[in-house]
Amino acid sequence: MEREVVSLLCDPDSRFSLELVGHNLRNTVTRRTYPIYDGIPLFVSTVSGPNLKRQILYNMFAPVYDLAQLLSRSIFRRPDCRREYLNELEIQPGDRVLEVAVGTGANLRHLPQDIELYGIDISWGMLRRCQRNLERWRRRAYLFHSVAERLPFSRDVFDCVFHVGGINHFTDKTHAIREMIWVAKPGAKIVIVDRAEKKVRVDYQRNPATRQFIDPGANAVDCLLNLIPNEMQEIKAKEICHGKLFCLTFRKPGAPQTADPQADSHYAI
């Protein structure tokens, strides 16, 4: 593992920095070690609650997950909504991008080539499948066995952070969101997508003047809006994929983006 990558990491429990020692990452203060197996650092020890259930499920189905998704879309004519949420990402050349719960890497395949890709997942089976997919696609990404509630990264290191399709089942949704904010750079956009419990016909967003949510007068999208810290900016939520998914976006306070994402058509997915 490159020293530049190690410099971005920290112990997810103490936040102390890590150093590479042989095939392990070691806490520079407490000397606690985290092994690296097949190029993937292991930060998961024990899990409980919904996280444990999802870990067992995804480990079991990892070998056939991609095929099952393909067959499901074909048989039930499910649309591929990837373009809708990936176009929400504000990615520039050279950016460092993190996907939380990367799964088999299906989203990474569609991102620009000239960026640094990082992914974490609670399922070792999904990470191994992701490794094989990346090799087949000739893509490179740094993968980590970790839970969303304990990200092994230092503060303010990613230009873009996103998550698709799992937060509804996280053990601690609030802490997972705060971890995404922790690792994002000031001014970075964070995108969270999952299944919608209710349909929304009007975008639901926070009034920048009053800091209160605007009631659209219709069914409000049920998408964890109440878990977003008040200090976050540009908080918006909308339905995508014909109402089957919600897309929640917000920006970490800090330096504004200098690039116009609308003008950067090369990075439209």
Image (spheres, grey):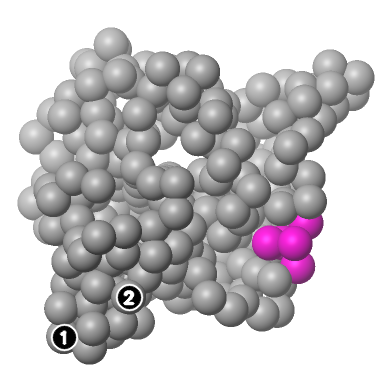
Q: Amino acid at mark 2?
A: Thr
Q: Position of residue 174 (x, y in %)?
A: 49, 74
As rendered, which of 252 and 134 lies closer to the eye? Answer: 134
Q: Position of residue 262 (x, y in %)?
A: 27, 21
Q: Amino acid at mark 1?
A: Val
What residue is at 48 percent from the left and 58 percent from the top? 145
The chief SS type of the magenta part is: helix
Quarter where residue 113 is shown: top left
Q: Residues within 10 Å of mark 2 (few under 14, many from 20)?
A: some
Q: Which residue is labeled 2 in the image?
A: 33
Q: Which residue is labeled 1 in the image?
A: 29
As rendered, which of 66 and 170 lies closer to the eye? Answer: 66
- 80 displayed left or right of 44: right
Distance, label 2 to label 1, CA atoms, is: 11 Å
- 36 displayed left or right of 166: left
Residue extending farthest to the bottom is 30
Q: Residue 61 bears which disc, if any?
A: none
Specify start and end residues of the magenta stretch as a single range.
Answer: 53-57
As rendered, which of 170 and 221 lies closer to the eye? Answer: 170
What residue is at 16 percent from the left and 85 percent from the top? 29
Quadrant holding the C terminus: top left
What residue is at 20 percent from the left and 35 percent from the top? 95
Q: How many marks?
A: 2
Q: Position of residue 147 (x, y in %)?
A: 50, 66
What residue is at 75 percent from the left and 62 percent from the top? 56
Residue extending farthest to the front is 22
Q: Residues within 10 Å of mark 1 (few under 14, many from 20)?
A: few
